Image (cartoon, grey):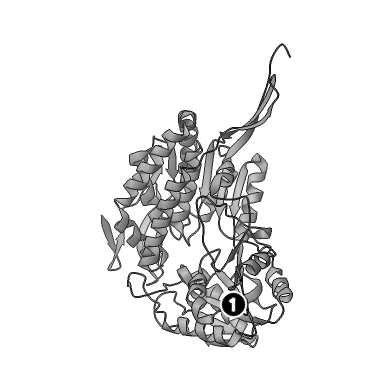
Amino acid sequence: MAVRADDIEIRDDFALLIDGELVTGSATLDVINPATEQIFARCPAGTTFELDAAVNAAARAFPAWSALGFSERADFVKRYVIALGERYDELAELLVREQGKPIAQARAELDSSFRLANETVELEIPAEQLVDSGKHRIELHYRPLGVVGIITPWNAPAALALGGLGAAVYTGNTCVIKPSPYTPLTTLKLGEVAREIFPDGVVNIVSGGDDLGRTLSEHPGVQKISFTGSVATGKKVVVSTADTLKRFTLELGGNDPAIVLEDSDPQAIAKKIFFACFVNCGQVCMAIKRIYVHEAIYEGLCQALAEEAQSARFGNGLDPDNALGPLQNEMQFRKVVEIFKDTIDGGATVLSGGEIPDRPGYFLPPTFVTNVADDSRLVTEEQFGPIVPIMRFTDIDDALRRANDTRYGLGGSVWTKDTARGKKIAARLEVGTAWVNRHRAISAYVPFGGAKESGIGRQNSVLGLKGYMEPQVISVTDQDS
């Protein structure tokens, strides 16, 4: 179903999911295709009324859902992934239209989120025996919390919604998902499929403006918030949870450094580093955002990376030949352009890219710059866009000092043929994940999260799942002891 407005076809076949019912509500959100800057869809904008209904539905569904065993809940998640796979092409194309990323990357987002969900429900969280003295036994158990609020950003809406959903419901919680107002559509379609699989109220999805996210964080009926987004908004989430002392997991922004040692082969690593910088147009929390290169190979790597950038096509994500799409929204586009102009005004040299196309869409080409000061905005802030500085170093201690001189601490990487040396250097990075000869790799079996201001808590792995549960000590003593 669609309606026409100003000769543009507006898709409007979207609904909130509340207590097993698809609800349209009274208000709407316009959704813009960032490749065209045109409204292409309209969806419901939930109000406090719809949010209360969703939280109440999740609370009613919690006792029966939490009473199921892990294996029973896992079966629901696996069936859900299968059902989503049956709408794979539809979801991938919709994700491109609302988010902007190339179709291959949209498919990769769905593939990885399906795999992560299936692997998550294979993890076991057994009771832990702490003491067993014959007459005195102490065990540590983990109980579901209740209603989990999941607030997702606009850069990877499908993956982050499905990741939070899978972790929450597998551990026995029910959930209310609130997607970004920039990218609500794919998430709402996830809700359509969830309605066919889960009992009423277990999964609820309410799109709306940013104020609705704050209301969800403050809601007394919610026991935990899982938030992925910017550091600034993450801090607001912490404040909004204070009155109810609800639990929270924050996966926030990053300013990931890559340190390239003198024994690296520029031609062998350039493609990997380029992709780690510019996948999703650089709009990835754990993308490489600063590159420190030993002076012995500095010129060679600069040339190799510039060649990668110059050969990479960018444009509408529905064209399979494009490696980069647009920035997702006008606000982010303007921010990145401003940072770029400040960088050039500060004396930096453009190695590749740098031109702002004169056409519709929030497009910027993949851009590398050199001669960038350590105190420039491009180095100290998270640009979250396709502009990356390449900086020279001579001493590894100096490179580490500069890499760690940031309030962020999500990820970082070291590139070298000497993996033993690389491991020692990686261990000195003040980050949640330090890679050697790769970047931006995650797994359901490996905890992921940030140090410093890049977050609190972890996602994925048994450690991440325990963040959705309350530890409970059960202490048993025989009467005759």
Q: Position of residue 455 (x, y in %)?
A: 63, 55
The quadrant holding residue 363 is bottom left
The quadrant holding residue 397 is bottom right
Question: Is 362 drawn above or below residue 179 in the view shown?
Answer: below
Question: Is 7 drawn above or below residue 358 in the view shown?
Answer: above
Q: What element carries label 1?
A: helix
Q: Position of residue 87 (x, y in %)?
A: 30, 52
| x 64%, y 65%: residue | 423
Quadrant the N terminus occupies:
bottom left
| x 34%, y 75%: residue | 321
Compared across the picture, whether 350 is left or right of 401 comes to left
User: Which kind of residue does numbered mark 1 sit on?
Assistant: Ile
Q: Is residue 216 visible?
A: no
| x 43%, y 41%: residue | 203
Compared across the picture, whether 38 is left or right of 432 comes to left
The quadrant holding residue 17 is top left
Q: Is residue 370 visible?
A: yes
Tag 1 residue: 339
Question: Is 302 drawn above or below residue 144 in the view shown?
Answer: below
Tell which residue pokes out farthest to the top in this image. 480
Quadrant the C terminus occupies:
top right
Q: Position of residue 27 (x, y in %)?
A: 41, 51
Work out whether residue 329 or residue 228 is closer to the camera in this orientation and state it.
Answer: 228
